[in-house]
Each structure stands twice: as C-alpha cells, then as structure tokens.
Image (spheres, grey):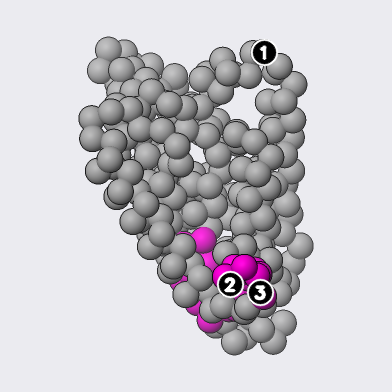
Amino acid sequence: MIPLKDTVPSRRFPIVNTLLIALNVFVFFVELSQGTNLKQFIYNFGSIPSRYFYLKTHYPDQLLNRFLPVFTSMFLHGGWFHLIGNMLYLWIFGDNVEDRMGHFRYLLFYLLSGIGAGLFHIYTNAHSTVPSIGASGAIAGVLGAYFILFPFSRILTLVPFFFFWTFLEIPAFFFLGFWFLMQFFSGTTALLLAGDKAAGGIAWWAHIGGFITGITLLPFFLWGRKRESYYNALKR
C-alpha cells in the first residue's frame, strides 16, 4: 500500500517537517558525492550494533563515539527508493503532528523518536555488523503520534488489487495499525531466522521501536497545549 495524502489540513506551514525533508535530501547528495569512499562513509556514520557494544565494553568513557552514529544514521539513506519512500511518509504524516505539537517540540520529538528507534534496533540485533541507516525509525515515531492524534483521519492510498491498482481512502487507525503489525511480524520472523548470526536487511525493530517511542513520548510533548479533536481539525 502506498499512501498519497491524508484528509487533515494543517493550520500552519510545517517549517520543521519541510526542513527535515530538505536536510535528508541534502545529506543523500552528500552521500552521492563520496564516490568510492561511500562504503566507508556509511560505516563511519551508520549505526552498527556490534560496534556500539564493543565500545560500551572496552571504551565505556567514549560516549560520543558510541552514541553519535545513532544520531547521524537517521539522516542517511541506502538509495533513491529508500529516500523517496521515507520522505513520502514524513510529508504526509509529519505536518499534522508538527501542527499539533508546535515547531520546536516536534523537532525534539522527531530526534528522540529516531534515537529510541536506533537503540531498539541495537539491542535487538546486538551481534549485527551491518550499518543501519535511514529516517524510518524517527518517522515511525511520527506515525505513532499520528495514530493516537488522528485515528479517524482517512489516508488516500494506492492499493494493489490482483493485476490492477486502485485508490482507496483508508482510516488512519487501520492503515497505521496494519503497518505496525507488518513490522512486528516481519521483525519477529527476522530475529528467529537470524539466530546468533549478524542481522542485515530492513531494520524492522527500529520501526517497531520508533512507533512505540512516539506513542510513549506523545503525552509529554502535548503537555500544556490545548486539546483538539480530529473533528475540530477537519473544520480548519
């Protein structure tokens, strides 16, 4: 399923969300400029669970070296489809969450969700030597917040139907609930198949961790802000 837009308008221009998208695109072009150094660039700034635990065990005082890749990995992507897919989700769901939280709170929420997602991935793939990159963990936090804030919003979605594609408006609670269940089942399967081997591929548990982190953090980022229902949001 490919989301195209939602039905909840924003009152204010989503400046932080737009800047985050621009920053991710800019960093991707920095990646492209690396040429033959790209692999080393990814290893330097991607989040590698085994490296995290190696530093934790042997160099516990090097906190910056241990945690910095968890942060920098949020802005790296593995290709055009990876980038475009993540930015599409951020564009559709991020503006409303920013509108509800406010600009600064949203920025902090996004970064903390990404860090939470990164740590979730690290602790569920402790032996992995594969760099984890991408904004999807932080975006999963945004999806978790949207799931709670706008459950009755409808998502215009491109859905495969046998040999054809069709457009459907799907309630957000179903679309995002289905998305989370897919991450959970895929992540559980990946862990069972990986066993003690280094895990690679999609960081399912970063998505799961980001979603859970977003839902957990949401009440703190709405503290003191006027409560607003979905139906009032539609009247803007």
Taking depth in this image into account, of 101 and 212 the one nearest to the observer is 212
- Please state if 153 lies on the left or on the right of 140 as rendered: right
Relative to 144, does residue 9 appear above or below in the rendering?
below
Can residue 135 be seen here? The reply is yes
Taking depth in this image into account, of 200 and 40 the one nearest to the observer is 200
Q: Position of residue 79 (x, y in %)?
A: 64, 36
Closer to the N terminus: mark 2 or mark 1?
Answer: 1
2 and 1 marks in contact (CB < 8 Å) = no
Q: Which residues are magenta?
A: 143-167
Real-space CA distance between mark 1 and mark 3, rounded to the nearest whole angstrom = 42 Å
Residue 185: quadrant of the picture: bottom left
Real-space CA distance between mark 2 and mark 1, rounded to the nearest whole angstrom = 42 Å
Q: Residue at x 65, y 44 (%)?
A: 81
Q: Nearer the viewer, mark 2 or mark 3?
A: 2
Name the residue tied to disc 2.
Answer: 161
2 and 3 marks in contact (CB < 8 Å) = yes
Q: Secondary structure at mark 1?
A: helix
